[in-house]
Structures are given as C-alpha cells and as structure tokens.
C-alpha cells in the first residue's frame, strides 16, 4: 500500500511510469496470491480441527506442508507475473520481440522446473515413480504446447491436471466454512449446499467460461466452419447446464433428506404423527420423480444448445411412450397402484404389513415396488400391482385374544379374579404401562372341551408390544394358578369297563401265568 501511495503521489516520466506501474502490479499480484495461499492454509487447518471427516484443501496437519507449498507458490506466481511484466515491457524499451520471447520461454522453463520439483518432492505423496515420471512427461508436453502457441489446448491440458484438485480444495474450504457457521433448519441446509456446491460450480463455470472465450476466438480456425464453432459452444454451454442441474438436484435432495430426518415434536397429536408418516412415505417417490424430471430437462436443454431440434424428439417420445405403455402395462399398473396406495395412506415406512404370503416391515419405496423386511431377516421386493388387499398391523391399537383350558374341578370364578389381578399388575408395571391400552381380563367361558373348560382372555395394547406383555402374562398366570390350586387341562383318555368282568379277566391272566 505504501508503494502504491508513493507511486500515485509522485510525478513520473511516461516510460518510467509504465515500467514502475507494470512491475508494481506484478508485485501486488504476487503478494495477493501469497495471502490467498496463507488464508487457504488457515481455513483448511481450522476445518480439519473441527471435524475428522472434513477433507482439507491442503495437508494442513503435516508440519512440512506449509514450508513446502508457500515458497513454491511464490516462485510460480513470480515466474508467471514478473515474466509477463518483463516480457511485455522489453519491446517498449528497445529490445526485440525475439529477446522478449526468450525471456518468456525462460520464465516458462522456471515454472516447469518448479512444477516438476513439486511432482517429485511433494510431502505425503503416495505416487509411484512410474506415475511421477508420466506426470513429468505430461508437464513437459504442456510446456511444448505453450511454446507452439496452442493456448486452447494448453488450457484444456491444465484443466485436466489442476481442475479436479482445485475443485476439491475449494469444496473443502467451503465445507470448513459451513462447519464453522453451523447453520440449521431448512434455510441453513439450502445455504450449506449452495455454498459448497456453488463454490465448486463457480470454479468449474469460470474455467469453462475462460475456455469458451479462448475457443470462440479460434473455433473457426480450428474447425474450419461455423458448425464446429456451434458444436464447441454447445458443449461448453452444456457443461454449464449440467452444473446448474447438479446444484438444483443437490439442494432438492438435501431438503428432502432433512425433512425425512425430522421426527414429530414431543406431544404431537395422532393427526400430526400420521401426516408426518405419510410425508416420509411419499418423499422418496417424489425424489425419484424429481431426479427423472431434472435429468430429462437437462438432456433436452443440452441437445437444444447443440442445435438439435428437440420438438420432433418430444413428439417421437410421446408416440414411443404410448407404444411402451401398451407393451408394459404391468409396469404402469405397478406405478399407478403405488400412487393410489400412497393417497389412501395404506401403509407407511416403518409399519408392519401383510399382503397374501408377503409380510414384513416397510423399509423403502421405489416408483414400482415396496421393500418389506421380514421379522426373520429376509427382504421382499413386492411390486405395488401384486400387493392386493393390505393388512396393516401397526395402526392405532391391537386386540390380542388368548385362550386357556382349565380342569373341570377348577374354580372358574377364582380364575377370573386372578386373571383380572394379573392384568392390573401388568398395567401398573412401568415396563408395560405406556403400551397397555386396556388391561388383560377374562371374557368368560368359551366352551366345554374334551379335557377341560376353555376360557377366553383379551388384551389391548399398542401395535407391536403385545408379544412381550402376553409372554409375561402367561408366566404370571401359570404361577398364580399353581399357588391357588387351579390346574391347566391336558388331554386325557378315560377307559370305562364293568368291575366283575375286569376281576375275572385278571384272575384268568394270573392262572395262565402260574401254568407257565
């Protein structure tokens, strides 16, 4: 700043003013690049300290990284900017163009030497010698392309080499910034995605825009016709369209994931819980449909940018769609059935359902099928069109009815009182109180069986909790019946016969045994 102030305050001769201004601008640019590099190291270090999973733009945790990279960044910037400044000034102070080109070539050789040295001595590099050798040859080839004046090819080669690393680095810095900001809520989620993906898209977009500027200048010469220029322009514009589509998709996907991760607030009524469950069920289908829509619009936009008439394609797609509709009626049936199942709120993610021979917990949906996880582990992928009638076992409440058989000499009234007492104890148990809607009780005598009196009991609980309560109830009933002399009936066979005949048969058997 002091140098700039002195330059502005003093009166300079025109030639000297031009020389000083050019060199001063180069110096300021080098210092600015150094400051940006230092800032990136600081942000990356802060980001790596906040989360173990946040990738850093530079290896900030390595103590040798900072002393290695900062001087080499300065050298690269110095060779580039001061070389440009000196080469541009030399023709104005009496040097020939050839001498200026030699200076530019020497500065380019300096940049090449620094780049090759970075390839072979970069700290923490796991690259093999073969890979390092190939990368060195690639850098030499780029230098030769620059010498030949093929700037469009040069920039394309630089993009292939540097753009992935730059995109990752910018994304890491943006991710570190987002992690430090700690935004929450839907707007925060959108903002975070917009910052991270937008930063990456901005880098790629700027690179594509610069490449488009260079290629549009030379497209006619390279392609030899306006068609080549149109194709090149369409391809570059298509990359921008892809970046915008990716940004929109990532924002939509993050919002949907955020909404699906939300759970109903404590104290929410049953209606709110039901609406939340239905929304969580429909969102995956909406996400898949949105992905297809964005992909189709993106492809059509890119084709339109390439000069292809998309109106016939849309018309042909309509006719083709009708033909496909006739040929894939089952698929259409599955998709439409799924839509109506969702509109009827027949089941939701996390509920246990049964349809025919298929039963299990609903895990996820697609456009045409539902995935059911059986309680023993297997997964059923069932098309919506094959579901038919649905038995939902996870809604509102469950009435579980049980049966017992006691002997005819047992006191039925005492059994009823014991069962009622057990039901009250289970309803008061902290383990089962929250899940019990109506306590266990005896409904009465159901029938008189061959071996005993059949009695019926019922229990109303929340869905899925009846099994544990029923197992505990059976244990308590067995113990209470044993303590009070009530016997559970078991199958028995009664043999009837006359007393005299039996005695005679026994006497005859003894005589035969004595004779033997």
Image (tube, helix red, strand yellow):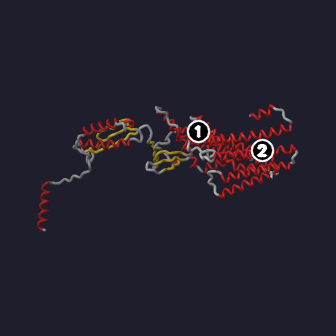
Instruction: Give residue 222's position: percent from left, percent from top.
Output: 80, 51
The one nearer the camera, 57 or 222, is 57
Q: Are the residues at dot 1 and dot 2 in contact (C-beta closer than 8 Å)?
A: no
Residue 309, visible in the rendered structure = no
Instruction: Give residue 450's position: percent from left, percent from top.
Output: 26, 48
The one nearer the camera, 482 or 232, is 232
Residue at figure coordinates x 11%, y 66% from the top left: 514
Q: Identify the image quadrant of the N terminus.
A: top right
Q: Is residue 90 left or right of residue 469?
A: right
Q: Secondary structure at mark 1?
A: helix
Q: Is residue 89 left or right of residue 320?
A: right
Q: Which mark is residue 82?
A: 2
The one nearer the camera, 191 or 147, is 147
In the picture of the structure, the residue carrying the numbered disc 1 is: 179
Q: CA distance from mark 1 to mark 2?
A: 38 Å
Q: Nearer the viewer, mark 1 or mark 2?
A: 2
Residue at figure coordinates x 70%, y 43% from the top left: 205
Instruction: Give residue 348's position: percent from left, percent from top.
Output: 50, 41
Asked which quadrant contains residue 473, the reply is top left
The one nearer the camera, 225 or 114, is 114
Q: Earlier in the sequence, mark 1 or mark 2?
A: 2
Q: Identify the image quadrant of the C terminus.
A: bottom left
Instruction: Give residue 412's position: percent from left, percent from top.
Output: 25, 40
Residue 3 vertical position relative to residue 64 in the rendered view, above or below: above
Q: Residues within 10 Å of mark 1 (few under 14, many from 20)?
A: some
Q: Which mark is residue 107?
A: none
Q: Residues within 10 Å of mark 2 (few under 14, many from 20)?
A: many
Residue 385, visible in the rendered structure = yes
Q: Secondary structure at mark 2?
A: helix
Residue 493 vertical position relative to residue 92 in the rendered view, above or below: below
Residue at figure coordinates x 80%, y 53% from the top left: 148
- How many numbered marks appear? 2
């Amino acid at each position: 700043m002091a140098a700039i102030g002195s330059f502005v305050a003093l009166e300079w001769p025109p030639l000297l003013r031009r020389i000083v201004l050019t060199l001063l601008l180069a110096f300021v640019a080098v210092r600015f690049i150094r400051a940006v590099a230092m800032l990136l190291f600081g942000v990356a270090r802060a980001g790596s300290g906040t989360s173990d999973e946040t990738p850093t733009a530079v290896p900030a945790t390595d103590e040798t990284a900072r002393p290695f990279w900062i001087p080499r960044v300065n050298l690269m910037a110095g060779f580039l900017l001061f070389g440009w400044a000196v080469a541009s000034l030399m023709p104005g102070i009496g040097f020939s163009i050839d001498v200026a080109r030699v200076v530019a070539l020497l500065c380019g050789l300096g940049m090449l030497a620094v780049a090759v040295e970075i390839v072979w001595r970069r700290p923490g590099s796991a690259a093999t010698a073969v890979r390092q050798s190939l990368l060195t040859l690639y850098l030499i080839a780029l230098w030769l392309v620059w010498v030949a004046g093929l700037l469009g090819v040069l920039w394309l080669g630089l993009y292939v080499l540097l753009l992935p690393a730059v995109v990752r680095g910018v994304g890491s810095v943006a991710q570190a910034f987002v992690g430090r900001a700690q935004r929450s809520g839907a707007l925060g989620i959108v903002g975070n995605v917009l910052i991270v993906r937008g930063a990456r898209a901005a880098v790629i977009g700027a690179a594509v825009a610069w490449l488009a500027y260079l290629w549009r200048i030379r497209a006619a010469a390279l392609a030899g016709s306006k068609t080549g220029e149109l194709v090149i322009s369409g391809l570059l514009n298509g990359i921008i369209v892809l970046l915008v589509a990716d940004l929109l998709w990532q924002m939509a996907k993050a919002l949907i994931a955020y909404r699906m991760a939300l759970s109903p607030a404590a104290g929410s009524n049953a209606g709110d819980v039901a609406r939340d469950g239905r929304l969580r069920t429909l969102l995956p289908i909406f996400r898949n449909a949105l992905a297809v829509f964005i992909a189709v619009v993106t492809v059509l936009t890119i084709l339109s940018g390439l000069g292809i008439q998309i109106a016939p394609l849309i018309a042909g797609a309509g006719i083709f769609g009708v033909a496909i509709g006739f040929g894939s009626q089952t698929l259409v049936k599955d998709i439409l059935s799924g839509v109506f199942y969702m509109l009827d709120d027949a089941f939701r993610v996390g509920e246990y359902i049964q349809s025919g021979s298929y039963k299990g917990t609903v895990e996820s949906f697609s456009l045409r099928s539902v995935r059911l996880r059986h309680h023993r582990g297997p997964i059923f992928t069932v098309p919506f069109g094959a579901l038919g009638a649905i038995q939902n076992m996870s809604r509102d409440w469950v009435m579980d009815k049980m049966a017992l058989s006691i002997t005819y000499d047992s006191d039925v009234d005492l059994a009823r009182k014991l069962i009622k007492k057990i039901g009250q104890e289970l309803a008061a148990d902290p383990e089962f109180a929250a899940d019990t809607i109506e306590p266990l009780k005896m409904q009465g005598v159901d029938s008189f069986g061959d071996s005993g009196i059949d009695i019926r009991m019922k229990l109303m609980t929340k869905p899925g909790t009846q099994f544990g309560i029923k197992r505990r109830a059976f244990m308590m009933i067995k113990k209470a019946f044993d303590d009070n002399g009530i016997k559970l009936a078991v199958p028995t066979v009664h043999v009837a016969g006359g007393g005299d005949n039996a005695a005679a048969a026994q006497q005859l058997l003894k005589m035969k045994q004595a004779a033997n």
